[in-house]
Image (spheres, rainbow, N blue to C red):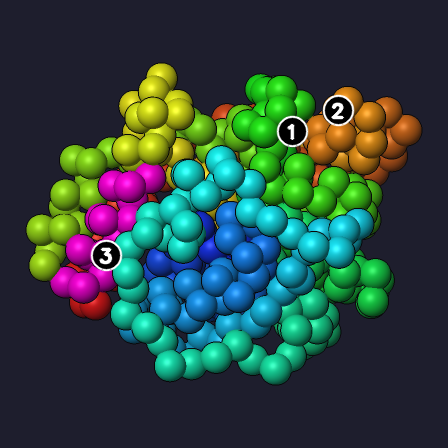
Amino acid sequence: MAKKKMILDLDTGIDDALAIAYALTVPEADLIGVIGSYGNVLTPQAVQNCLDLLDMLGHPEVPVFAGPTHSSTTTTFSVMPISQRIHGMNGVGDVSLPHSSRTAEQMSGRDFIIEAAHQYGDDLIVVPTDPLTTLAAAIKKDPAITHLIGNVTLMGGALTIPGNVTPATEANINQDPVAANEVFQSPLPLTMVGLDVTTRTLLTKKKTAQWRALGTTAGKKYAAIVDYYIDIYADVHPHLNGCALHDPLAVAVAVDPSLVTTLPLNMKVEVDGPCAGRTIGDEELLDQPVHSQAAVNVDKDRFEQLLMTHLTTLFQNN
């Protein structure tokens, strides 16, 4: 069976760093490129984090592209204070990474998605774990890609539980509700991996200690990065007893949908009013063919075991 081709679209904070590591290890897909965009950090920092992490993990062949620097409805962007607190000022828990000498590709992240869609078609998986600005821009430039891309599995939204920015909104969707709505309302085959399931998957310091014990650069750096995340979670979300594995879960579901139970539902994103950014079923499309689904339950134990197996193997060698 031919491998799928995967693009990660990240605002490279800590869980995005875990998503990169997971994507490099899954046997079902080849990571053909990574896009660094605004969100947890500014775009240049996201790009540098992607380059540094990929090189540290032994994969300097994976190209990195720059995404947008702000939302589709603004002209500037400032990182939210809560994002700086959760991910650190540099996005990776203020841990210093070995510096990559590479730079971003000249092609934009938007155009890379378009090119890959035409090249790989149904074999292409796009995994955005950031605001959906890049993907919306690609759709706007070339609407044909909505009928070419095999699947979009995004980390974002909240359907059955409250958001983490406001009671109605999750952070990635909150950054650009208009772009998110354009993606949700497009014909793309879409799976939403939102807070409904990601906050059920956790990592603890008992697990990161296993990575540190490997004695490798990657093992020690990732342990330090995730320990920072766990400490912040203990303060901000003490009821979870660990840090949530938001972005790596989206990568896992992209290649193994059986990890989650989904609700088939045509969705929309509220773009204005007090509930701007809310992801919810579209009442105008209830009787239309369904092209999207929202994850509402997860095989927590199996995913957490997969993550530890994949990442420990990767860190052993780097």
Q: Secondary structure at mark 1?
A: loop
Q: What residue would you read off at disc 3?
A: 221
Residue count near mark 2 (Cα–Cα under 10 Å), binned few <14, some 14–19, many ≥20: some
The segment highlighted magenta reads 216-229
Q: Tell me what residue is drawn at x 19 percent, y 56 percent.
A: 219
Rendered view: 51 above or below 243 = below
The amino acid pointed to by label 1 is Thr
Our reading of the magenta stretch's main secondary structure is helix
Return the x and y of residue 223 as percentages of the image width and height: 22, 48
Return the x and y of residue 51 as percentages of the image width and height: 42, 70
Q: Tell me what residue is drawn at x 75 percent, y 63 percent.
A: 138
Work out whether mark 3 precedes mark 1 in sequence or the reverse, and give the earlier one.
Answer: 1
Q: Tell me what residue is drawn at x 41 percent, y 50 percent.
A: 89
Q: What residue would you read off at disc 1?
A: 169
The amino acid pointed to by label 2 is Cys
Q: Secondary structure at mark 2?
A: loop
Residue count near mark 3 (Cα–Cα under 10 Å), binned few <14, some 14–19, many ≥20: many
Left or right of 19 on screen, residue 133 = right
Work out whether mark 2 precedes mark 1 in sequence or the reverse, and give the earlier one.
Answer: 1
The amino acid pointed to by label 3 is Lys
Q: Considering depth in this image, is 229 or 88 the residue closer to the camera?
A: 88
Image quarter of the C terminus: bottom left
**Quarter assignment of residue 285:** top right
Question: Magenta includes 226?
Answer: yes
The answer to whether the residue labelled 3 contacts the one labelled 1, judged by CB atoms less than 8 Å apart, is: no
Left or right of 227 on screen, residue 102 = right
Label 2 and label 3: CA atoms lie apart by 39 Å
**Quarter assignment of residue 147:** bottom right
Q: What residue would you read off at disc 2?
A: 275
Question: Magenta includes 312?
Answer: no
Q: Considering depth in this image, is 275 or 3 the residue closer to the camera?
A: 275
